[in-house]
Image (cartoon, helix red, strand yellow):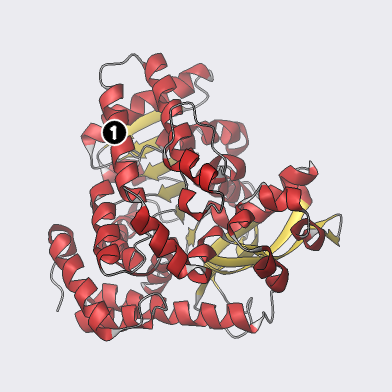
Amino acid sequence: MKLTVIGGGSVRAPEFVRGALAFAADLKLDELWLMDNDSARLEAVAPLSEEIVRRAGSPFRLCQTTNLDDALRDADLIVTTIRVGTEQGRVFDERIALKRNVLGQETTGAGGFAMAMRNIPALLAIINRAQVLAPRAWIFNFTNPAGLVAQTLYDAGFRRVAGICDSANTAQYETARYLGVPVDAVKTEVYGLNHLSWTRKALVNGRDVLPELLRADGFVNSTHLRFFDPSLIERLGMFLNEYLFYFYYRDVAVQRIQGEERTRGEEVLALNHELFEQLRGLPPAEALAVYDAYNRRRSASYMAYAETDEALREQRTNPTAETEPVHRPHEEVGGYAGVALRAGLAITQDRPLRIGLNVANGTAIAGMRPDDVVEVTCEVDGTGIHPVTIGSIPEGPYLLMRTIKQYERLASQAILAHDRALAVEALVAHPLIGSYPLAEALLEDYFEAHAPYLGDWH
């Protein structure tokens, strides 16, 4: 089998390679290709991956390339994780929004749309090429904003593409961790959109254990559920995706982020710059130790501003190399690598799996259109990906889903057509924006900041 990662110069690539080692035998993995158009980053990151594979006895061949065709040709599984405009683009996205008192988070609202404008055209070119060179391959997209990206790719006619996100499966992993049972012994029911989802059940031996877990302080305080008021969790009665914080606590999120010295994008930009400076000239073994310390620091500060405990928030917003992460979404749920590799194994080797993915709704969630891409629990096997039947959902989540889906549909049309007027309509439809003058001002700022990447819009 040939597995290809597009965006292989990402700082997360070595972690993906670590994950691939655990799946190598079952996948019958012969080659793992890391492709990136940034040769400098690829040359900095690839040696870390090579060292990881070497230490594991080199069970597969690791290839690095800047040639897209070489990476795609005859691939069986393709993972796309790109960031057009690099971390600096994220910084622009956040600061432009915050300047106008709008949430600037990179996957939600204004920041997410700006990121989509840059990433989606590049992904369309990549996947069009994959259709020619690897027509049987399944493509798992982790490029953000993953939900809007998946919707646009579906609207563009691509069918062997699924959106992946580790947060869709957090409830399953957290339940398994807390109860001390294997992950696959927990059967969850997840519904929503990417970064806007709810888990309504967690079945263990056929019994729904979620209600009692949501009442257990030990469980709540050991997960990101501690970001939310206990009364809200009690009223909703579901495990909440951490990104719902931006919708349920919008004003709090904006105020706290504006109160920080650096945005998350600026923090990641600084951490990455420091990492690449430190890696320069180091032998692989030392470089890998530096990389692992970087990962600890980055994980420690994830969503730190959502913490209600001031001391804990201060600790996480000023991490050191030794800081142990309090909230570990990537490590605990296996990251995007775990989602892609588990789903890839289920499809290519017919190993039935239950997992949350971003795919077309079909008839899964009542009231959503068949071609609405949703985040939903799926049964995956050698025949493909099949959303489970969720049926009717509570009106609150349903109305929020429908509102965000309206935004995503307009945004997809706008990006595919390069239509500025539709882009304004999309941002006005988003509940975190909701104003024509504000939408127009945001777009003008984003077009100015990202002009080299956007092409001609009319």
Residue 183's place in the image compared with 402, above or below, is above
Asked whether, in this view, residue 421 is left or right of residue 391, the answer is left
Q: Can residue 371 be seen in this view?
A: yes
Q: Relative to 457, say whether 275 is above or below.
A: above
**Horizontal and vertical percent position of residue 216:** 78, 54
To which quarter of the image does residue 275 belong? top left
Q: Which of the two residues, 357 or 334, is positioned nearer the viewer here?
A: 334
Point out the image quarter for the C terminus.
bottom left
- Residue 334 screen position, x and y as percent: 58, 42
Indicate the secondary structure of the residue bearing disc 1: helix
Residue at 32% of width from left, 64% of height from top? 111
Q: Where is residue 27 in the image (x, y as percent from the top left)?
A: 58, 39
Q: Give the amino acid at mark 1.
A: Leu
Q: Which residue is drawn at 75% across and 45% down?
A: 178
> Toward which corner of the image does residue 47 lie, by quadrant?
top left
Q: Name the residue under label 1.
A: 42
Residue at the spot 68% in from the left edge and 66% down from the top edge:
233
Q: State the image coordinates of residue 314 (x, y, percent, origin top left).
A: 47, 42
The answer to whether any part of residue 175 appears in the image is no
Q: Is residue 130 above or below residue 69?
A: below
